[in-house]
Amino acid sequence: MESIGLSNIDFVIIVVYLVGIVWYGIRKGKQQSSEEYFLAGRDMTWPIVGISLFAANIGSNTLIGLTSDAFNTNVAVYNYEWMAAVVLVIFAIFFLPFYLKSKVYTMPEFLERRYDSRSRFLFSGIMIVGNVIIDTASGLYAGNLILKIIFPEVESWIIIAFLAMAAAAYTIPGGLSSVVHTEVIQAILLVFGSILLTYFAMDQVGGWQGMLDGLNAMNAKGEIAKSSSEVLSLIRPATDDHMPWTGLVLGVPLLGFYFWANNQFMVQRVLSAKDLDHGRWGALFAGLLKLPVLFFMVIPGVAAIVLFSDLDISFLNYMVPAEGGPILCQNLADCPNMTYPVLIYKLLPTGILGLVIAGLLAAMSSSISATLNSASTLITMDFTQKINPNLESKSLVRAGQIATVILVILAAAWAPMIESFSSLWVYLQQILGFISPPIVAAFVVGLFSRKANAQGGFWSLVLGYASVLGFIVYSFAVYGGIGYEDNHIHFLYIVPALFFLCILLNIVISAMTGAPDEQKLKGMIWTKKMYQEETAELQGLPWYKNYRVLALILIAVTALIVIWFR
């Protein structure tokens, strides 16, 4: 059995980073008005918007989830990443112009303008719950996963409380401006650390060819069920347990669409753009940044199959749920969540280890600060301001700060519960799969159908989430759980089924309750005329300023990667 320990150099790097990032975040904060606090004054340029989107997405939970799922299910998990580029192109073309021109603070506010206040409040409440239990809590859990190994004698709740306070330290006083500026630093550090880990992993495994040879040798011995070509294949058969191609086509885009185009904590960064062009360029830049994730976040997990499949990891002191109480995890194959910790502790030298751990804490802090700020924005602008519309701008800022404190406490309290789930990545995707379809359906129908009205929008949300609750109750009653292994229904099939059900409900209920008010439709429906007018405006622009050309380039690069690893 081995032991874990950090050198003094590693500790110094981690402490200096934490202190420095809190100081920098407070220094960059803006809170003179509600627009400055919640939307950073709407003056962010495209590089900041793009890097901020990327950093908020690649938190410690996503990083650990990607690597562990690559170890557990191979590179198919990358399908979530490249699909983001496609979704962001659609977002930039169709949805972003409406968001920015409407000058809204929140996505529920936009839904109110298209439907009514009932849809706004319902969506806002669902999103606040989602931000707390999905993004903030999982970020705290992932941070605890790393630090618990270093400090096994410290209770998890103490580590989680410390991480929560560190993330809230600059989010509460500085608002979105603090979040966005610190995310730029954090993204650079995180990517640099991930590239270093990839280098050491590939060096240890003998390079790309060494990894392929190792995978094929394990396959020949029966230690793994797939050859190297199958392990590195993105497009899987319809019978695949983890990522069937039918689920990739029907389910993954809908999850991505909610995350990038409807989720407050992601869209809020684009709403902070100084104008439509910078918003579009920033969104496309974020899509471009997602593509290299295959090589420095997914591939290390594949390399770990060769390097550490038979490793005894009891020295990591990682406890897993079991009947009769938690037990010590013995094998990496049984505890894939520990793939990233194993990689960094086994491969990285002194100094670099501290830097990478600082990067992980950066990712955790980035994700948590993003969700805290967006959730406090929802509470303040969708509830507090509605209850008391006479509040001054500074009072709204104070309400947002109080909301942040409450939310971080709730997230810290929920985070330990994630240990009862079999996988962090499964937890993230399945919960997202239940939350996203009704919302995505409401936005899609609302933007493209003139016949959808307030009744259709609201009741499609209500009945959609009632269907979700019914399915969960049925799954537990009949199968004892909601996972694919429990009820034999892959969640990537549940997502499109719910989506099309909610579209049908919206259309039918709208048809039964009369035509919508024309004032509700003014400036809220996408038309072919808008596309033609925009085409005229783009004529004469150099290619690097024409977002359509940039979007085509992004799609082409994405297609090349998918075809290469098909």
Image (cartoon, grey):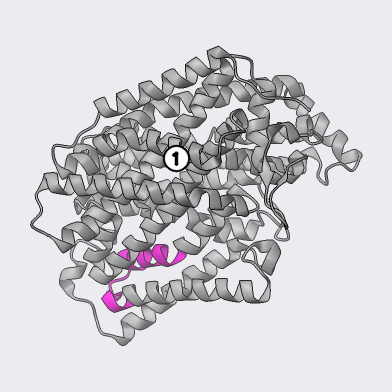
> Is residue 7 located in the magenta-colored stretch of the structure?
no
Q: Which residues are the magenta region? A: 437-456
Residue at (35% x, 77% y) in the render: 459
The residue to which callout 1 is attached is: 161
| Mark 1, secondary structure of its residue | helix
Residue 168 at least partly seen: yes
Residue at (25% x, 84% y) in the render: 514
**Magenta stretch: dominant secondary structure:** helix
The three-letter amino acid code for the residue at tag 1 is Ala
User: Crowdedness of circle 1 by 10 Å Cα count: few (<14), some, many (20+)?
Assistant: some
| Position in image of residue 277 (x %, y %) | 26, 39
Q: Examine the rendered structure and indicate whether residue 67 appears above or below residue 262.
A: above
Question: Left or right of 105: which side holds 355?
Answer: right
Residue at (55% x, 13% y) in the render: 8
> Is residue 448 located in the magenta-colored stretch of the structure?
yes
Question: Left or right of 96: which side holds 300?
Answer: right
Nearest the eye: 13 or 73: 13
* Outermost bottom residue: 512
Q: Examine the rendered structure and indicate whether residue 268 appears above or below residue 45.
A: below
Nearest the eye: 167 or 192: 167
Residue 179 at least partly seen: no
User: Looking at the rendering, which quadrant does residue 456 occupy?
Assistant: bottom left
